[in-house]
Amino acid sequence: MKKVMKKRPTAKTKKPSVKIRKARLLVVDDESDFVTLIQTILMQEGYGVDTATSATQAIALQRKNAYDLALVDLRMPEMTGLELLQYLKARDKSIFVILMTAYGSFSVGIEALRRGATDYVAKPFKNKALKEKVAEALSRRHQYLEEQHSIRHSSDEL
Amino acid sequence: MPYTETRFRSFQTLIRIRTICLALMCCLLMISEDARSSPAVTTGWELLFIGMALSLVFGVLGKIKRLVPWLSPVIFIVDGIFVSFWIAISGGPVSFYVPFFLLVLVHAILVLQPRMAVIVVVILMSVFLGFFYLDYIWNLSNTFGATQINIISNLLAHSSPEIRKSVYWHQSLRWFFFSILMIIVCSIAMRQVWVREERLRIKERSLEQKRHLIQMGEMTGRVAHGVNTPLGLISGNLELLIAETRKSTKTYRRLIQINQYVQRAIRTVRDILDYGRQTMSQIQLVSFPKVIQAVAAAVNPKLKRNKSRLILDMDSKLPEIKGYPDGLYQALLNLVENAIDSIAENGIVTLTVRFQYQSMRLSAGDQRGEIKVVVQDNGRGISADKLSQIFEPFYSTKDFGKGTGLGLAIVKRIVDEHNGTIEVSSTVGVGTVFILIFPVEGLKPNQTADSEDFYYNKSETNSKDLGL
């Protein structure tokens, strides 16, 4: 199998559409300073960001509001990030989740993706990298919703 | 070590039981004495004394723990010869074999395993019965019947020295062969013991290593959490601060400098964690195409920054390798990242993965093979004097602060863990080639390079920083 790496389609990541800009995000980490930091970084990008410092708080917030994307820490006291991820996904199928961890490895990443996470960031990350990941996840969610919509549309036609 | 301790205790018991067995022989000799009461059999007593003396010697030598593993097979074999000749020379009774078998059995249970004991006894019994049968069909003499021996002994006692000599000679020869057989049997049994001991030692060592690894893993996990969280906070806030500060001010320059050092700290911690992490995951079947796809996805941003290309050349059919997915990913990632660092703009890194059968095949059906991974770049190259050092930890050819010198040490370690080999050749100005060879079981027909279930194929943009 001979293969030359293709160029990544970056147009979407660099210029997110207006729809994506208005996205609502949920950040969950047991470290409150960290949550605030991420909130600040992402608010600069124009997203609406809510924060939670525990899994229960996150679940309560999800009951009240609908979120497009959640950033969840892998290691938390009450519930691991993977559990919370599944919980959030169960309540809202369209939510996209990015997992964050201080102790990343290839298999943790695989496990996260297997359980339905969209992406995976290892702490410490650069602010730019985080922004890119969020933008990318949101554009993928956008694609996903469009696909879902067209599927529904075509099934209606039938 | 608990194992040696057990062995030591069982050896002491062995010596004691050996003495009891000899005492039993003594009783048998006394009982048969009346039946024989002839000068021909008195040698039995002398031999018994020798046996007791041997027991004493073994007991003294057994105090030296280092000798114990060697002493027990020695006793085993010496006793076999001893009892054989004893019966041969004293002219009976064959019931002397009962204590000997008891000795063998006890020895086998204590030193070997119960299962081995049964095997040893069965072999000895069959040899013994074989002699019976041969005696019967060849009608040589009734060596194996106690009564007959007694009769022979009595006859011998009253016969002329010449006849006695020839009969002794005849019997001794027979028992000599029997002893040789016994030695062969004992040697086979002991070989089994040594093999098992070696296996146990290896198992113990690997257990020890595993325990060490778990501790190491826990420690690295804690360090990771304890260091990476604050580092993340510092670098995140710092970047915000830099963005808020006006350029060309003193503060800005200072913040940039702080940021450089923070980034270096982050890199160092990451590399040390990778080096210390080793293999936290379980050994599992790893598919090379998946790992390579993940590596390709991870280095993609770096490639673009460098305006370089990565050419993947993989066999369409690759067997899965037993190993650690994290480790293999890490090793290949480090190699490819190094290659990209060494090339100038528009450079080319080639990653080739091939399956080949082992060069030394035992037979046509021998399916053992190896996976050969070649990472080639057309970069600066490494000079010959540095080439021998590159796998040493904390050795770096990169500019100060750029590399921690752990990257290739990690690669070497991971390759070693997979029983693989790594070779490097380099020419300054032309490029560097790393050749990794991993042994694999072989190619199964259903193992192909398809990786449709794999997440990285869905989008190459995904997971660019995955795992690091």
Image (cartoon, coloured by chain):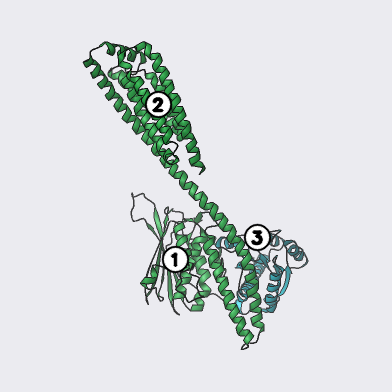
Chain colours: A cyan, B green
Image-quadrant location for residue B177: top left
Q: Which of labels 3 and 2 is toward the front?
A: 2
Q: Residue A102 falls in which quadrant of the image?
A: bottom right
- Front-most of B381 and B354? B381
Residue B370, disc = none
Q: Identify the chain of the residue marked 2, using the numbered disc in the image.
A: B
Residue tagged 3: A82
Numbered disc 1: what chain? Answer: B
Does B14 appear above or below B324? Answer: above
SS of the residue under disc 2: helix
Of residue B238 and residue B354, the one placed in the foreground of this image is: B238
Residue annotated with mark 1? B392
Q: Residues within 10 Å of mark 3 (few under 14, many from 20)?
A: many
In the picture as drawn, the residue positioned furthest to the right comes out as A64
Quarter of the image with the C terminus of chain B is bottom right
Nearer to us: label 1 or label 2:
2
Mark 1: secondary structure: loop
* Closer to the eye: label 3 or 1: 1
The relative height of residue B201 versus residue A30 in the rendered view (above or below) is: above
- List the residue tagged with mark 2: B52
Inspect the image, locate mark 3, and give the three-letter code of the amino acid beneath it: Leu
Figure disc tally: 3
Q: Is the residue under label 2 in contact with that under label 3 (CB below 8 Å)?
A: no
Residue B388 appears in the rendering: yes
Percent of width and height locating residue B412:
45, 62
At 56% from the left and 75% from the top, the residue drawn is A9
Label 2 environment density (alpha carbons within 10 Å; few <14, some 14–19, many ≥20):
some
Q: Is residue B304 above or below residue A73?
A: below
Q: CA distance from mark 3 to mark 1?
A: 37 Å
Under mark 2, the amino acid is Met
* Contact (Cβ within 8 Å) of mark 1 with mark 2: no
